[in-house]
Image: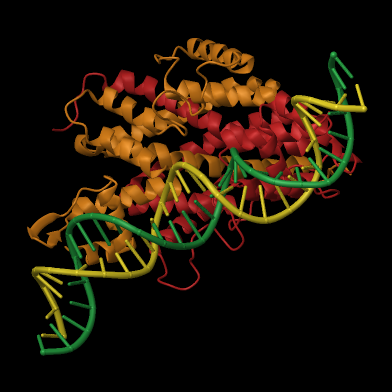
Chain colours: A red, B orange, C yellow, D green
Amino acid sequence: MRIGELSRRTGVPVPTIKYYVREGLLPAGELTSPNQASYGVAHERRLRLIRALLDVGGLSVAAIREVLSAVDAPGESVHKVLGAAADRMVPGYGPGGAGADESEGEPDAELEAAREDVRELIARRGWDVDDRCPAAEALAGAVAALDRVGQSGYAEVLDAFAEAAEKVAQADIAYVKRRVALDDLVESVVIGTVVGDAMFAALRRLAHVDASAREFAHIRTHD
Amino acid sequence: MRIGELSRRTGVPVPTIKYYVREGLLPAGELTSPNQASYGVAHERRLRLIRALLDVGGLSVAAIREVLSAVDAPGESVHKVLGAAADRMVPGYGPGGAGADESEGEPDAELEAAREDVRELIARRGWDVDDRCPAAEALAGAVAALDRVGQSGYAEVLDAFAEAAEKVAQADIAYVKRRVALDDLVESVVIGTVVGDAMFAALRRLAHVDASAREFAHIRTHD
DNA sequence: GGATAGTGGAGAGTGCCGCTATCCATAATA
DNA sequence: TATTATGGATAGCGGCACTCTCCACTATCC
């Protein structure tokens, strides 16, 4: 298959495919002559993955490159590869911490308190995770943001959220064990993680609307 | 309080505050003389909300403007205001549909099938929800993406996700009913929705890491 | 064999977005 | 009085995800 057909089958414009190749998201086609290359189903599959990560997951091109390099890294334990991929999927991941500058400056009391909350939560649930991994940092960042905005009481729901997250993670793992071959495992987890976030967020919104219809239909706002 | 102090208390640079005022995210300060204005705690609060929506929620400035205009709209039923706000918090929300062009072109079989799945799910759960609202469209978009990437079997987990989402939504509502005054209700729901998404995503990742340690510690990848 | 369309590769350009810099006349502060 | 801060407005910047343009060449159709 040449680039034009790859473009037709995926709906991605030819120049965009070339751009992805340049950016290292997609391997180049196999050259059959100096200016002729052929692409296979692996390219098509990878291209669809890229678009899903981009359009549904909202990852940046740089983040996708990182994630894919973890997907393609060979010969480690699955747990380690999954961890490496997961780290790179948290929004705001980058070399040297969770997006913000941090290093020097005032101590940031909310963030420190939030980190402590997160450590306690992890201990309470008996999770075998590093409390300084990107996901834990992201969680602390969210809790700190609630604090700063005067909704610190919202931390009360953390345990209910964690309970639900465990259930969801169990469903994720069960699906992967049931249906996915080892070769595709990491890729499946990546796509499941990223578009699963979007799915869950949408479902939560639907559940909110439903609950709000029952609770707030006849109550009016201020003003 | 003048703009400098507002800046110091929130950590937002003065030019950025001016920019938010220009963009209609933040009301202007009350003028005390031709070039002197005073800001109150309401401004500080609103500014922190903006930063949380921007930094943690990843909303665009345009989306924040939309959401805030729903927050400030007076005199409707709470349910309607919440619905309006919720609609605007869906990633990719905009005038005329879910981000993509759609109108004309090929029918997009995956998306249609996914919409049908979503309708069935909503019926199955007995949710009192419009199946064409932005959240339902976003869900269909995610399901369609899974389909396109060859993970259509992932729809098997939809019910488990929905179950968990209901639990989370119940916790959200319980929190709001317990702790929030009517005046702050919409704002609290907005912040809870947006940073709750980030919290849940982080928790799911932590639960994944924990589960993966148990399941995949000794299995190696391909290559 | 000749016309037309498509190709790989690479650099430059585009449009949007969230700021940031600069300027100015005026006002607060030391 | 000298310095610093302010409101308001316009212009510029850096990053990002493309998209355009150009070129010599190749494939394909008649």
The correct choice, above or below, for B10 with respect to A81 in the image is below
**Count of marks placed on residues:** 0
Q: Residue at x 32, y 19 (%)?
A: A213
In x, y percent, where is residue D30?
85, 14
Q: Residue at x 32, y 18 (%)?
A: A214
Q: Nearer the viewer, residue A159 or A193?
A: A193
- Side of B90 relative to C3 (left or right): left
Q: Nearer the viewer, residue B213 or A77?
A: A77
Question: In the current view of this chain or complex, which residue is farthest to the left?
Answer: B33
In x, y percent, where is residue A112?
45, 62
Q: Residue at x 49, y 29 (%)?
A: B99
Residue B63 sits in quarter? top left
- Side of A129 relative to A21 (left or right): left
Residue B155 sits in quarter? top right
Task: Examine the rendering and report whether any part of residue A42 can be seen.
Answer: yes
The correct choice, above or below, for B79 with respect to A162 in the image is above
- Side of A138 relative to B16 (left or right): right
Report the quarter where the N terminus of chain A lies: top right
In x, y percent, where is residue B28?
19, 51
The correct choice, above or below, for B10 with respect to B54 in the image is below
Q: Nearer the viewer, residue A10 or A143?
A: A10
In x, y percent, where is residue B128?
39, 14
Residue A177 sits in quarter? top right
Report the quarter where the C terminus of chain A lies: top left
- Side of B90 relative to B203 (left or right): left
Task: Examine the rendering and report whether any part of residue A182 can be seen.
Answer: no
Q: Residue at x 26, y 50 (%)?
A: B22
